Structure formats: C-alpha cells, structure tokens
Image (spheres, rainbow, N blue to C red):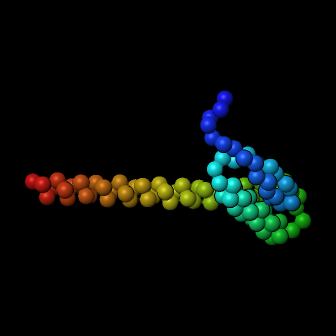
Amino acid sequence: MDSGVERKTVRVTIYNQPYTLAVSGESGEVEALAHSVDQLMSDIAHQAGNVDGSSVAVLACLHLADRLRGVEQELSDFRGQVGEKSRRFSLLLDQAIR
C-alpha cells in the first residue's frame, strides 16, 4: 500500500550500535534525536559505571519516560490555565455585551 510519502533511509549510531532507519521528511531531525539518545546513554553509562548496554538502555528509557510525564503534566496544567482564562474572558465578554 503506497501512502504517497517518499521514504528514505538514514544511518545513525546509538551507543556504538549502527541503525538504519526509514524516515519520511527531513532526516536531520532523526539524526538529531539519535544523537540526543546516544549522548544520554553515554552519560548514563559514565555515571552508572560498569553496566551492560541493556541496562543503560532501560535506564535511558526510564529517564525519557520521566521527562515525558513531566512535559505531559505541564501541558495539562497549561490547558487548565487556558481553559480558566477562556472562561474568564467569556464572562467579561458577556458582561461587556449586556
């Protein structure tokens, strides 16, 4: 099934392991993400000492999951603030129209 989106392959290295990824759009963003993951895993390995690659990968996943949860909470808080401001503006608009 052809979705009409042209895919290309990008080669990246994460924690000394080469990967070939199929991407649509700009490959630079995937390369930047791969570099960030590689850097995170290298930092974790440096801090954790003598641990195997699988453990480093799990710790990196936990770190990223924690960051994601924090961003999701910030987004939820922001949506709540926007909703509250919208209600206030709606009330002010209703008062101004009357």
* Residue drawn where x is 68% and y is 59% of the image: 28
From the viewer's perspective, is 21 left or right of 80? right
Does residue 19 sit above or below 49 in this rendering? above
* Residue drawn where x is 72% and y is 59% of the image: 31
Q: Position of residue 44 (x, y in %)?
A: 78, 66
From the viewer's perspective, is 92 left or right of 9? left
Instruction: State the residue lying farthest toward the top.
Output: 1
Q: Position of residue 83 (x, y in %)?
A: 35, 54
Residue 34, located in which quarter of the rendered image? Answer: bottom right
Residue 2, located in which quarter of the rendered image? Answer: top right
Q: Position of residue 67 (x, y in %)?
A: 62, 60
* Residue drawn where x is 12% and y is 54% of the image: 97
Q: How many numbered marks appear? A: 0
Whether residue 64 is visible, yes or no, is no
* Residue drawn where x is 69% and y is 61% of the image: 32
Whether residue 50 is visible, yes or no, is yes
Which quadrant of the rendered structure holds the C terminus? bottom left
Residue 50, located in which quarter of the rendered image? Answer: bottom right
Which quadrant of the rendered structure holds the N terminus? top right
Does residue 41 sit above or below 25 in this rendering? below
Instruction: State the residue lying farthest toward the bottom.
Output: 47
Which of 25/77 is in front?
25
Q: Position of residue 95 (x, y in %)?
A: 14, 56
From the viewer's perspective, is 90 left or right of 27? left
